[in-house]
Amino acid sequence: MAKEVSLSIPSTPGMELAATAQAEALGEAMCLGRDKIDEVKFALVEACINAFEHAGQNAGRVDLRFRVSRRPGGAEMLEVTVADRGRGFDPSRVEPPELERKLRGRGNKRGWGLKFIQSLMDEVEIRSTENGTTIVMRKYK
Amino acid sequence: MNESCRVETLRDGDLAVVRTEGYINREGGEEIERCIQTLLDAGVCRIVLNLEKTKIVNSIGISILIEVLEKMMDRKGALAFCRLTPTIDKTFRIMGLAQYAGIHATEEEARSALSATA
């Protein structure tokens, strides 16, 4: 039977740590392991920051859902969903960051969030429209 | 809810160790940047950044660390990281940071590596 927790946090820097506390509690409960829990926390911080920035001033809150479940016949997993009601973005148009270019370019050093999320989680789905963005991230035990 | 980052500096000639404690977000990154800028202005161009007491960073803090690295490269300096959590270590390697800054298990190893660049 799946365990599920929902949380709504203000779109305010620092509140991502409230989200990571929940991920840590569920990860420990399912014995996910320290390194995997830390990877989920890191990816979750990035997803929250992304939501805060894309949600804008008017969108207010970010909705999170944490779900521990098991694929039929498969491994147990922690699934984290982060949803905002911002203006959305086209993930296919996000340019992959390159450190060399950022060091030489003297320009914007940011743009690492999606790369970190996709590298640290086992599965990532991004659905984005003009009414908001939902990122679903899964980590298997 | 926030967890501020504290920074401690130990200077040894033209080498310094900067030890952080807490979350490296925008504010934490800026605190590190201020600290390293002070060292660079004083002529210290070989710096070890010890993250032993930092368990979480975010991409905004990391972007400021890239700015720090850029400044150090401009001064022909050298930056080395040590005592990273496995996740922070993995993240830095995903970025390709190891091509531009040392990543070491211990502070002693990092100091030795930077001393060899003198």
Image (cartoon, coloured by chain):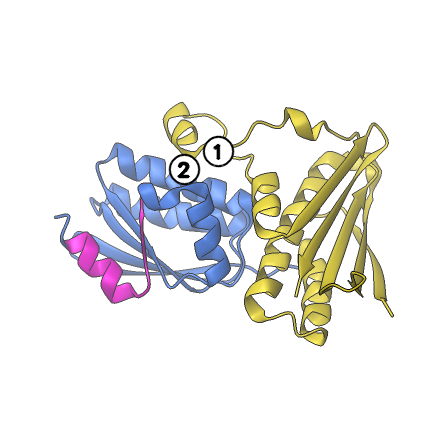
Chain colours: A yellow, B blue
Q: Can residue B11 be seen in this view?
A: no
Are circles 1 and 2 on residues that touch, CB within 8 Å? yes
Find out whether residue B110 is within the magenta segment: yes
Q: Distance between the residues labelled 1 and 2?
A: 7 Å
The residue that disc 2 covers is B67
| Residue A134 horizontal side relative to residue B109, left or right | right
Nearest to the observer: residue A103 or residue B16: A103
Image x and y of residue B10, in percent: 27, 62
Q: Residue at x 13, y 53 (%)?
A: B116
Q: Residue at x 25, y 56 (%)?
A: B16
Is residue A73 visible to us here?
yes
Residue under mark 1: which chain is it in?
A: A
Protein chain holding label 2: B
Q: Which residue is drawn at 24% across and 66% down?
A: B108
Inspect the image, locate mark 1, and give the three-letter code of the amino acid beneath it. Lys
Identify the secondary structure beneath mark 1: loop
Q: Residue visible at 77% across and 48% down?
A: A82
Q: In which quarter of the image is residue A4?
A: bottom right
The boundaries of the magenta stretch are B100-115
Residue A134 place in picture, x, y as percent: 79, 42
Q: In this view, does A117 lie to the left or right of A48?
A: left
A21 lies above or below B91: below
| Residue B107 image-quadrant placement | bottom left
Badge 1: residue crowd in 10 Å (few <14, some 14–19, many ≥20): many
Residue A110 position, x and y percent, is: 53, 35
Q: Furthest residue to the front?
A: A73
The residue where tag 1 is placed is A109
